[in-house]
Image (cartoon, helix red, strand yellow):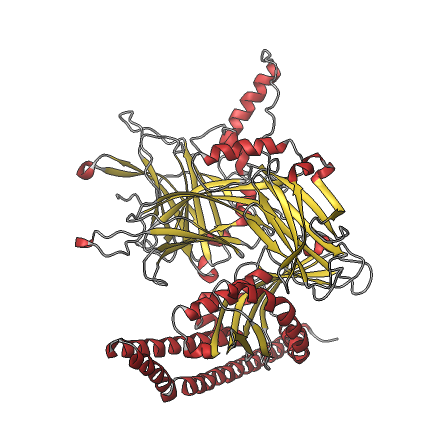
Amino acid sequence: MDCPTNVLLRENTMKKFSASKTLELLCNRLNDGLRYVSQKISQVLAWTDQKMNSHFDIYLFLKYSLMYCVIWCVSEIGLSWVMLSIIYLVLMKEKKDKLTVRLLLAYMNIPTIKSIYIAAPKERPSWVTFPDMERVEWLNKIIRQLWPYAGHYVKDLCKYSIEPSLRTALEEYKLSGFQFEKIILGDTPPRFSGVKVYDDTSRHEIIMDMDVAYAGDCKFEVSVSKFKMGIKDLRICGKMRVVMKPLVKQIPLVGGLQVFFLNNPDVDFNLIGLADVFDMPGLSDILRSIVTDQIGYMMVLPNRYPIQLVEDIDVVELKCPLPAGVIRIHVIEAHNLMKKDVGIMGMGKSDPYCILHLGAQKFQTKTINNTINPKWDFCCEFLTDVIRSQEIDIEVFDFDDTPGKNDFLGRANLDVQEIWKSGEIDMWVPLSDAKSGRLHIRATWLELSDSAPALDLQLEEIRALQNTTKNPLHSAVLMVWVDSAKKLNHTPDPFVRLHVGNTKHETTVRQRTNDPVFEEGFSFLVRNPKTQELQVEVVDQKTNTVQGKLELDLNMLLKEKNLEIVSEDYSLSGASGGLAAIKLSLTLRILKTALKTDDGDGGPKEKDVPPPAKVEERKPSVETTLEEVMSSAASPLMHMLPSATDNSSLRHRPSVSNSGMHGLGRIELSVKYGPRNNLVVVVHQVQGLQKEEDGELPDPYVKLYLLPDRSKDSKRKTDVIKDECNPKFDERFEYAVSPNELTHRRLEVSVINKKGLLFLQRSSTMGQIHMDCGLLDAEKVTQWYDLAPAMDEEEE
């Protein structure tokens, strides 16, 4: 047997050998990584030089000079304007090339060193920022192999789906006869930089979010009004969602796919042919907006691109699923916006308006002239198909008479899932990407109900809201499934046109058939089902004649079971022979307001819940008195930690002690880290503040710092509430902070008493809390915190 000394010596030797092997392996891996990164950077630099040399040369200057010299010769434009136009176009071309370089960097997905330390946060691959996103290089290799075979599918898609809709869109600009002449996909496939698979979904579906970037060498040549033009170097970046639903018990185990973008992707391209000659503000903006709108019409929510994989599935559920709900947004006002219009002695104002986006849905407020504190009172409603990972984007602009010159005043984002959880939010939201300004927004979540009596309640709420806003509001959602038509006249190219109020939808065209099968669904927001009707027309695209029409009173749906009619054949009036018919399925859902906070089961607490029954009063017994004494004694212990109860129980049920553990009061906050690398803090309310020594009520406000940065950039403040010990703020603030920084940051929240006027004003800290941002709990966003004495008492 070995002696203990030999055994110990052998163990130490093995440990040293294992450590040296591990260190050698790590060094080899690091060298391979550095070599790979250097190769990628060299490729990018070489590509950049080639791109700049091929585009930014003397040919570009001569081309624009010749074009504008011709314009100068046949018109009275001064020579100086011609030279300014040439310089502007050359600078725009250089800007496009720089954008191409940035998108190529993101497309190549250069790892670790380039992505983390050089790229901006928005340009980093998602798997770097979010740990739940995974790299999928194996998927990119598969797509690279399949890409040459995708050409025929894309050609059919462009010819039969995109070409008709683009032809209709261009006719609004007096451009007719649009058609694809040449479609070349090129050799560069799209690339997926990160994938997230959700594991808390229904067992009958699989949901994936994928960051897709396409910076390809494709080329599309088209003809419009007998002119040849086209686009090349198409670039698309965005977040795509793939829903595998339903799951079936036969191969391929997935019944169908739904593919769509959660929000409008970033789209850019270069023009060729005649369009490149006139690549100037106006025409190029029109073409880009048309391309972006068509992508949104096909694949941005609420629009989806469905793919059926198995025959025996519910096609209606795949192609036209029921919306999750409706969000009613009320943009009330703004405060302290930036001044963009130049005035005398710095007294300029702005002419602000808002644009609201949710996926492909878009609304715009009216313009309020000459103010930085506008009041819009604008209401709109978004159909919402997806709850998580989607945001309502609100952008504020200063209107100018010059087209394309509206100044940007800032943006705000609302998380759809947060609105769904809360039922209703009403708060001031600060504008990001702006020096100053905030928006007062109210957002309400509306459920879909199949109960006809709920209609009267919703109509009453709409009448009350219409007193403050002139915008039309809705009480119901109508889903129409157009299955097929039969026995049409002659041999037309039919499509179906649907009208409800001022909203119109059209199916795709079916070529040369008397019995077309459409299988398409559409959703309409309805103001009042008791008085409105659905108008249906079957139209021949070749002759633009109506093959037959139908009018249906929506009031009849209120009498149907579950407010729906399934696969009903309706005769079309106006058709020769009287035999033409169309098969439709109709579903009506009543909007129902739900005010709630997250109650643990993810479902709303309804607004119209009947009040609880009264409990008979009885004399206190010995047992009840003991219970009350024990509960009152235990209450200070319950308030030592942030409450784990949900927001609704705290808002609607008064706590046992509002003064907190230190007797300074309590504050209610919502703190979470958002998907845009932003720390979101919502200050709801404060309770139990102490009066001043002379008995006066305080004038409190809340001040925030993201430590260790105690500077003006880190400072956030709420409004001052006069003479109140229980102030309610409901104001939201944001900090842009990376995930790596978040673990080293602390949030300091102070309640300040701002009493007095001008030089007699005194500001003292009434209470304070500190939060470690690295320990945020995603499951407990909204909590109460006991105010403690200030660590560093400071005067404002």
What residue do we see at 54% from left, 45% from top? 327
Residue 110 makes an appearance in the image: no
Camera-side residue: 58 or 443?
58
Counting labels gives 0
Residue 342 lies, in percent from the top left, at: 23, 57
Q: Most extreme residue toward the right, as rendered? A: 250
Residue 639 lies, in percent from the top left, at: 49, 35
Camera-side residue: 123 or 683?
123
Camera-side residue: 174 or 792?
174
201 to the left or right of 116: right
Specify the quadrant of the image occupied by residue 400.
Answer: bottom left
Residue 187 drawn above or below residue 547: below
Residue 124 drawn above or below residue 659: below
Specify the quadrant of the image occupied by residue 99.
Answer: bottom left
Camera-side residue: 235 or 294?
294
* Image quarter in which the C terminus is found: top left
Residue 578 lies, in percent from the top left, at: 75, 50
51 to the left or right of 322: left
What residue do we see at 70% from left, 56% from top? 318
Q: Most extreme residue toward the top, as rendered? A: 619
Residue 426 makes an appearance in the image: yes
* Image quarter in which the N terminus is found: bottom right
Residue 63 drawn above or below residue 685: below
Residue 763 lies, in percent from the top left, at: 26, 39
